Image: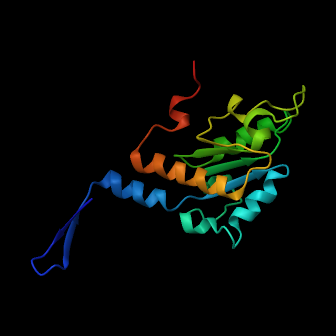
Amino acid sequence: MAVRHKKDGTPGYALTTLESLIAWGRKYSLYPFTFATACCGIEVMGAFGTHYDLSRFGAEVVRFSPRQADVLLVAGTINYKMAPVMKRIYDQMLEPKWVISMGACACSGGFYNNYTVLQGIDKIIPVDSYIPGCPPNPEGIIDAVVQIQKIIETGAPRAADRWPIK
């Protein structure tokens, strides 16, 4: 965006493209939907609390309906019985949509290496940002939101655009 100033130094008009204006609006109006199943859910609550205040980064309004959300924050262990529910929630979300996988369990199954636990949610839905740790800290959630904002700002391909990887 280029800003043209008048001769007296006051701002006159701004030049931009429609795509960059829409990206700017999307960047600062993320609506997360939290799918928390385990101890990582407490860290999500901490990130939305007053100390870390995720609302400063444009992800303030947590939605409790997938039809009103565009960021899916998966926090915790996902077993095979929950996987179809999570896939349905992902399918019901608005386009464009982004996914954050939070914690060792959601990213890779964690220490639950057995027949009931899904070994990473990227087996059924595309993931844009991974937050490592057990449990991860709220700073990781903030970093993942900033990563998604950079994806939106630069127009980089989303995980859904390159998924499934063949």
Measuring 70% from the left and 62% from the top, which residue is drawn there? 47
Measuring 87% from the left and 28% from the top, which residue is drawn there? 113
Q: Specify the quadrant of the image occupied by residue 104.
A: top right
> Is 80 in front, or is 38?
38
Measuring 73% from the left and 37% from the top, which residue is drawn there? 107
**Quadrant (top left, top right, bottom left, bottom right) of the N terminus:** bottom left
Q: Residue furthest left?
A: 7
**Quadrant (top left, top right, bottom left, bottom right) of the C terminus:** top right
Does 117 sit above or below residue 50? above
Does 100 sit above or below residue 7? above
Q: Residue furthest top?
A: 166
Give x and y (percent) for residue 62.
66, 63
Q: Specify the quadrant of the image occupied by residue 121.
A: top right
- Taking the image as drawn, is residue 122 in sight? yes
> Is 88 in front, or is 109?
109
Does 89 sit above or below residue 142? above
- Taking the image as drawn, is residue 60 in sight? no
Give x and y (percent) for residue 35.
75, 50
Give x and y (percent) for residue 58.
54, 64
> Is 8 in front, or is 15?
8
Q: How many marks?
A: 0
Task: Please state if 144 lies on the left or on the right of 112 as rendered.
Answer: left
Measuring 43% from the left and 60% from the top, which residue is drawn there? 25
Give x and y (percent) for residue 33.
68, 55
Colouring convention used in this rendered image of the protein: rainbow
